[in-house]
Amino acid sequence: MRIATWNVNSITARLPRLLAWLESSGTDVLCLQEAKTTAEGFPAEQLRELGYECAVHATGRWNGVAVISRVGIEDVVRGLPGDPGYDGAEEPRAISATCGPARVWSVYVPNGREVEHSHYAYKLEWIEALKAAVAGDAAGSRPFAVLGDYNIAPTDDDVWDPAFFEGSTHVTPAERAALASLREAGLSDVVPRPLKYEQPFTYWDYRQLCFPKNRGMRIDLVYGNEAFAKAVSDAYVDREERKGKGASDHAPVVVDLEI
DNA sequence: ATGACCGTTAATAACGGA
């Protein structure tokens, strides 16, 4: 089974590329982030024509997550139990579903903006709630993974220049400790191989030729439990999908499982 | 070549992204 995660930065803007990529990559299950549309605006019909069902949690301009599957979708849960919310409102940043033999979450962890910003505290609280919500499945025997845009680079090797990010979000000890806490709950980082260069970056800023210069970050992660990790036969970042006009600023992370 | 922000909202910039 081929499972992937991809922050598409608007499914409306990305639809032609998304449909083409689903077919060319042979992806069975896609965890999608930043749909940037409403549930009604989600292109369920176009996906259905390709043989995919979808479960969507999206409310409009920002955020929005989905699971897209051609191996079934059952037991869909929209939202994160215990979500702290931001500015008094819960945002659509998590959805979970069972697709064939595996249960998956698609998550879009809050950005944090700046270390002193209230959004940063929200980010840390949000991950705490995520840990509480997934701990049971993480410790279970069914293949289980939390895939998505974590907005955290796990180590200094996961950014193109650690000095460039000094003092900014995505690399702080507290954020990395939050990831470590998830791992302590029974999840491990399924690190993909890069198709070019040394580091498996998944995001490159649109600006200043970051992609051609490979000034990237690895912030899109696959955290799987033991049964999931044991079944992994390959994992890679499809950087080809970051090329050319109409690309998202994130590339898909693809994982092959022997289940 | 992979190439010097993009997408949404809304109407002219503002905002978020990371």
Image (cartoon, helix red, strand yellow):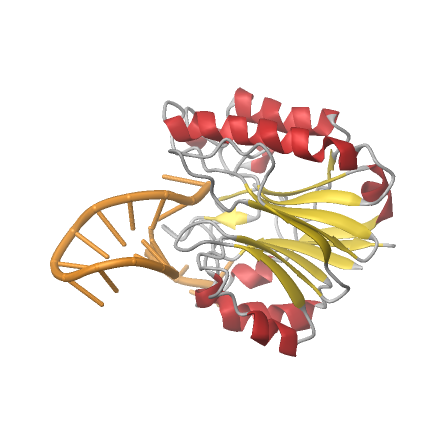
The percent position of residue A139, horizontal first and vertical second, equals 81, 32
Q: Which quarter of the picture shows residue A55?
A: bottom right
Whether residue A65 is situated above or below residue A225 in the rendered picture: below
Left or right: A53 with respect to A98? left
Q: Residue at x 71, y 48 (%)?
A: A104
Left or right: A125 with respect to A61? right
Q: Residue at x 53, y 70 (%)?
A: A43
Q: Residue at x 59, y 44 (%)?
A: A107
Whether residue A138 is situated above or below residue A64 in the rendered picture: above
Seen as rendered, the residue at the extreme bottom is A49
The number of numbered discs placed on residues in the rendered structure image is 0
The percent position of residue A31, horizontal first and vertical second, equals 63, 54
Whether residue A114 is situated above or below residue B18 in the rendered picture: above
The percent position of residue A253, horizontal first and vertical second, equals 65, 52
> Would you say residue A151 is visible in this rendering?
yes
Left or right: A249 with respect to A138? left
Q: Which quarter of the rendering shows the C terminus of chain A?
A: bottom right
Q: Which quarter of the picture shows residue B6?
A: bottom left
The percent position of residue A186, horizontal first and vertical second, equals 77, 30
Left or right: A19 with respect to A24? left
> Would you say residue A155 is visible in this rendering?
no
Closer-to-camera residue (A181/A122)? A122
Q: Which quarter of the rendering shows the N terminus of chain A?
A: bottom right
